[in-house]
Each structure stands twice: as C-alpha cells, then as structure tokens.
Amino acid sequence: MKMLDRFGLKPKKLFIEVDGEKQEFYSKPISYNLAVFIANEFDDNIRKLVIVRHCLCEADGTMVFEEDTELDVIGDQLPYEVISLMALEIAKSSGPKARGDELVKKLAV
C-alpha cells in the first residue's frame, strides 16, 4: 500500500446537530500546513472559516470550496452556527485523540 493511501487526507463522515436535527457532512482532516497556519492565526472566526474552506468536501473527496475562495464568501453562504459546529467537529476528528482512537480500532480488528 502506498504511503499516501495509508496516511493521506481521506474524507470522513462527520455529524453536527442543528436545530435538534443530526446533519452529516464530509471533511478531510486538517493537514500539517493548515494546522501550522491555524496555530499562527489569532482570530478565532478566521480560523473557523479557514478550516471549513480547506476541509469541507463531498463524499467523493471533491472540495466544496476552492482554495482561493474568499472567506467572506463562505461566511455569506453558511450560517455562523453551522460554520462553528463544522470547524469544531473537523478539528476534533483531526486531533491526536481522534488518531489514537482510530489506531485502537484498527489494532482491535
């Protein structure tokens, strides 16, 4: 198996709750370069928008937003609550705990 097939940024199905309804969406994990950018960005709202821009995708991995999409365009297309919830779920699913949980699942198989 090729390295990128094992460790590449594959889409994951994630869930958020909006108005009492469970909503699914797909996301690629936060890449190393994106994590470095986010760590150096001090505006929390910009961090959320950047995470959504670079991680939100369709089930087949096609990105919802282009890399050069202006952040205000994303902010105009999605409600604040949805952006915040998606960014939080993407960050949680990309962090070390998420990787540790997936490793435990793989080792248990």
Image (cartoon, rainbow, N blue to C red):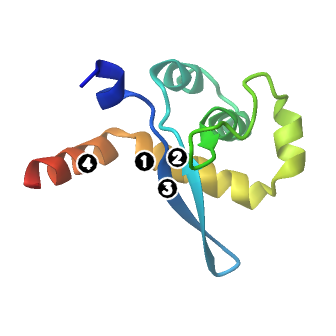
Q: Which of marks 1 and 3 is in front?
A: 3
Residue that mark 2 sits on: 90
Q: How far apart are marks 2 and 1 (CA)?
A: 5 Å
In contact (CB < 8 Å): disc 1 and disc 3: no
Q: Which of marks 1 and 3 is nearer the N terminus?
A: 3
x then y, percent, for residue 70: 85, 28
Q: Is mark 4 on a helix, strand or loop?
A: helix
Write the residue at 19% across / 44% down.
103
Q: Which three-letter amino acid code belongs to the residue tagged 4?
A: Glu
Q: Which of marks 4 and 3 is in front?
A: 3
In contact (CB < 8 Å): disc 2 and disc 1: yes
Q: Distance between the residues labelled 2 and 3?
A: 10 Å
Q: Is mark 3 on a helix, strand or loop?
A: strand
x then y, percent, for residue 28: 52, 39
Label 1 packing within 10 angstroms: few (<14), some (14-19), many (20+): many
In contact (CB < 8 Å): disc 1 and disc 4: no
Q: What element carries label 1?
A: helix
Label 3 packing within 10 angstroms: few (<14), some (14-19), many (20+): some
Residue that mark 3 sits on: 13
Q: Nearer the viewer, mark 2 or mark 4?
A: 4
Quarter residue 105 falls in: bottom left
* Residue 93 image label: 1
Label 4 packing within 10 angstroms: few (<14), some (14-19), many (20+): few
Q: Which three-letter amino acid code belongs to the residue tagged 3?
A: Lys
Residue that mark 4 sits on: 102
Q: Is mark 2 on a helix, strand or loop?
A: helix
